[in-house]
Image (cartoon, helix red, strand yellow):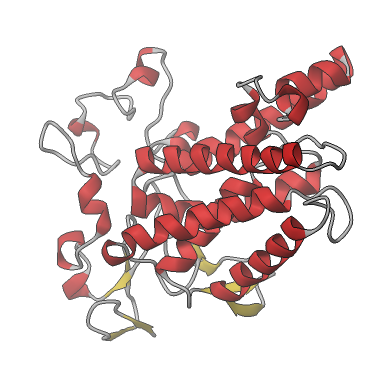
């Protein structure tokens, strides 16, 4: 049995909104019936909302979005592989992270460490290499590094994007990632200790985590699919570690290894701040779920649809 987020009615077969992730009874299943935040993002100039199911909406037969990608023969409709990325910047960012991870290895083995750092690492010694403000967000130091960030972004990114809209989410992700990296580098510039480069999407990932936490601090996250933990406890743990690490003499390495604690803290603060700004007009479900309806935003199996419970 599930409870309707609007009226509290118990439903054996509830409806899951593909835009806000909420759970509703038959009476409140339509977006306009539960004041869905996604309504603010339906700004189709033709006056028709493209749900991804009706190809006649954009007048094409390929199932694409009718945009630039269609001109190059790329099918972004729900039936194609690229349908996962249609209206879904969360998956786009994850794909860029994977591509960048491979490119890092190619550059490192082909051109050496100097080229690697100049292209992918935001470092106090090359802070004016402005491209690294962006590339460092998508670059990672190893497999476990990228997997850890990808898990957070995959399961929480879609929830955040559904509340903000894709355009705002893009600015939020890139902005928090850049400010987190620059915050870490800025701290090192005023410290007397050794300088370390910064790379990784941890700042953006923790901004997402902070944002979702403010919207629903009691959101249940199933650690390793088994242990139910409220999201506020996970965010609180990261906050404590990040604050303690930032106050350490080097601003990093509290628990061993080169951990950019200040970057984590900056990202978390940005997420908490923005969550407070939109809290009154946003809604987050009570559990993380995935395995959504086929053909919906982001393609089949995206977070937010009815199905299993998301791990962390």
The reply, left or right, for residue 198 in relation to residue 292 is right
On screen, residue 57 above or below 212: above
At a point 19% along the width and 71% down the height, the residue shown is 28
Q: Report if residue 74 is visible in the image.
A: yes
On screen, residue 66 above or below 261: above
Screen quadrant of the N terminus: bottom left
Give the percent coordinates (x, y) of residue 88.
Answer: 43, 41
Give the percent coordinates (x, y) of residue 32.
Answer: 15, 61
Query: How many numbered marks appear?
Result: 0
| Residue furthest to the left | 47
At a point 19% along the width and 25% down the height, the residue shown is 59
On screen, residue 290 above or below 236: above
Q: Report if residue 303 is visible in the image.
A: no
At a point 47% along the width and 32% down the height, the residue shown is 82
The reply, left or right, for residue 207 in relation to residue 151 is left
**Front residue (pair 167, 73):** 167
Give the percent coordinates (x, y) of residue 101.
Answer: 73, 32
Give the percent coordinates (x, y) of residue 115.
Answer: 80, 16
Screen quadrant of the C terminus: bottom right
On screen, residue 46 above or below 206: above
Indicate the quadrant where residue 37 lies: bottom left
**Front residue (pair 238, 48):** 238
At a point 56% along the width and 40% down the height, the residue shown is 179
């Amino acid at each position: 049995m599930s409870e309707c987020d609007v009226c509290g009615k118990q439903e054996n077969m509830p409806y899951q909104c593909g835009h806000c992730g909420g759970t509703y009874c038959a009476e409140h299943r339509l977006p306009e019936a539960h004041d869905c935040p996604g309504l603010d993002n339906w700004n189709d100039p033709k006056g028709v909302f493209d749900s991804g199911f009706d190809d006649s909406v954009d007048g094409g037969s390929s199932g694409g979005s009718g945009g630039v990608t269609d001109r190059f023969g790329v099918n972004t409709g729900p039936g194609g592989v690229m349908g996962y990325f249609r209206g879904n910047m969360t998956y786009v960012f994850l794909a860029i992270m994977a591509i960048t991870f491979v490119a890092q290895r190619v550059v490192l083995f082909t051109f050496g460490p100097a080229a690697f750092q100049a292209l992918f690492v935001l470092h106090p010694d090359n802070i004016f290499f402005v491209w690294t403000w962006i590339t460092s967000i998508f670059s990672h130091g190893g497999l476990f590094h990228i997997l850890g960030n990808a898990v957070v972004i995959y399961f929480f990114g879609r929830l955040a994007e559904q509340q903000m809209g894709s355009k705002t989410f893009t600015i939020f992700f890139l902005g928090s990632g850049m400010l987190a990296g620059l915050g870490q580098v800025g701290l090192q510039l005023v410290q007397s200790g050794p300088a370390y480069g910064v790379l990784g999407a941890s700042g953006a990932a923790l901004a997402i985590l902070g944002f979702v936490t403010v919207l629903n601090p009691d959101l249940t996250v199933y650690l390793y699919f088994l242990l139910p933990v409220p999201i506020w406890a996970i965010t609180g743990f990261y906050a404590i570690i990040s604050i303690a690490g930032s106050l350490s003499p080097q601003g990093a390495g509290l628990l061993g290894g080169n951990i950019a604690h200040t970057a984590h803290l900056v990202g978390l603060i940005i997420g908490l701040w923005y969550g407070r700004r939109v809290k009154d007009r946003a809604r987050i479900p009570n559990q993380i779920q995935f395995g959504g309806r086929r053909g919906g935003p982001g393609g089949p199996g995206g977070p937010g649809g009815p199905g299993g419970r998301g791990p962390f």
